[in-house]
């Protein structure tokens, strides 16, 4: 596979990782941090998964497709959790997560 085939998914993963990092940091500054614990946990998991998926695709790993399938699951879970919160950073993160999930699902197909 050529790296160009991965470009849109790599970009979505990179965008999602940044959105998740931003969301986690912002959630930790919320008044009720305990209420945001699940969001922060999923943000961190999702950001790590997205960075790894992007790296695997960039180097055309034999495991990229399988990893993208798992990454999509984590992105959906994170997007659903972030979607439960009204904060702007959570809404932006949810959008990035769902967009990344779609790209990763397309890549894994």
Image: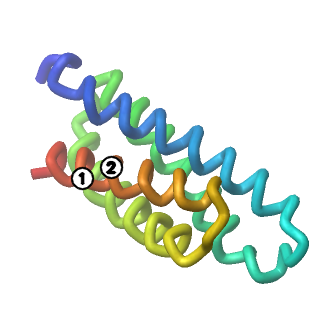
SS class of the residue under badge 2?
helix
Q: Quadrant of the N terminus?
A: top left
- Residue 53's tag is none
- Residue shown at the point (50%, 38%) measured from the top left: 51
Q: Write down the residue under mark 2.
A: 99
Q: Write down the residue under mark 1.
A: 102
**Separation (CA) of disc 2 from disc 1:** 5 Å
- Residue shown at the point (45%, 73%) measured from the top left: 80
**Relative to residue 32, is residue 37 drawn left or right?**
left
Q: Looking at this view, is 99 or 49 the one in front?
A: 99
**Relative to residue 82, is residue 44 drawn left or right?**
right
x, y (%) of residue 28? 83, 61
- Residue shown at the point (9%, 51%) measured from the top left: 109
x, y (%) of residue 77? 44, 71
x, y (%) of residue 41? 66, 67
**Relative to residue 30, is residue 59 drawn left or right?**
left
- What residue occupies the far bottom of the structure in this picture? 35
x, y (%) of residue 78? 49, 66
Contact check, label 2 and label 1, Cβ < 8 Å = yes
Q: Would you place residue 39 above or below residue 17 in this image?
A: below
**Relative to residue 87, is residue 2 drawn left or right?**
left
- Tell me where residue 13 sits by quadrant: top left
- Residue shown at the point (35%, 57%) measured from the top left: 98
């Amino acid at each position: 596979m050529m790296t160009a085939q991965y470009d849109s998914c790599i970009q979505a993963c990179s965008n999602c990782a940044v959105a998740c990092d931003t969301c986690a940091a912002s959630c930790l500054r919320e008044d009720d941090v305990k209420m945001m614990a699940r969001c922060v946990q999923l943000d961190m998991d999702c950001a790590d998964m997205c960075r790894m998926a992007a790296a695997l695709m960039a180097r055309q790993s034999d495991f990229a497709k399988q990893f993208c399938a798992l990454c999509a699951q984590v992105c959906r879970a994170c997007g659903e959790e972030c979607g439960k919160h009204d904060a702007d950073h959570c809404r932006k993160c949810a959008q990035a997560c769902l967009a990344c999930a779609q790209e990763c699902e397309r890549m894994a197909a």
